[in-house]
Image (cartoon, rainbow, N blue to C red):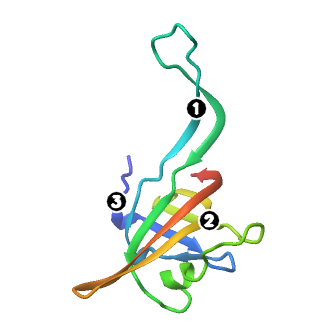
Amino acid sequence: MALSSPATMKIEYDNSGGTPVDITQYVLTINDISIESVLEEMHPFGSNMEAFMPVGVGKIAPIEIGGLYDDTATTGPDALFAGRVPEVPGTAITRTLKVTWRSGKYTNFETYLISYDRTADRNNLTKFKVKLQPTGAVTEA
């Protein structure tokens, strides 16, 4: 059994040209990647227990990534996330988020940017937080 650890993880996000950029060095936090089935409640009258049935649709909860703010021209978080809100309907291009858990094991999917925050603190380094909405199919290998 091979275990995943923070030291073996890699996080990549597409730039505006669709090329994956390794942002691992900036990331300090990432929430759960929660993939779930959409269910319809199906308990009939006269039943005292809930019953559900899958509708054949899955979804991924929004992803929040936080870390060290950096305005490096092409590879820092600011280069990837700043100035993109609002994304224009019909012209906004999805960008791939890929999380490699360990060598050969990864999860990736397309996303739209929901929000990009920068937090200044006079006693700490400036941090960023980005919220992404997954869309479409998930690839897991």
The front one of 125 and 73 is 125
Label 3 sits on residue: 5
Vertical placement of residue 71 versus 89, above or below: below
- Separation of residues labelled 2 and 1 (CA atoms): 24 Å
Q: Residue at x 59, y 20 (%)?
A: 42
Rendered image: mark on residue 79: none
The front one of 40 and 26 is 40
Label 2 sits on residue: 112
Secondary element type, mark 3: loop
Q: Tell me if 74 is positioned left or right of 55 in this view.
A: left
Amino acid type indicated by mark 2: Tyr
For the image, the number of numbered tags is 3
Q: Earlier in the sequence, mark 2 or mark 3?
A: 3
Amino acid type indicated by mark 3: Ser
Secondary element type, mark 1: strand
Q: Earlier in the sequence, mark 3 or mark 1?
A: 3
- Separation of residues labelled 2 and 3 (CA atoms): 27 Å
Amino acid type indicated by mark 1: Leu
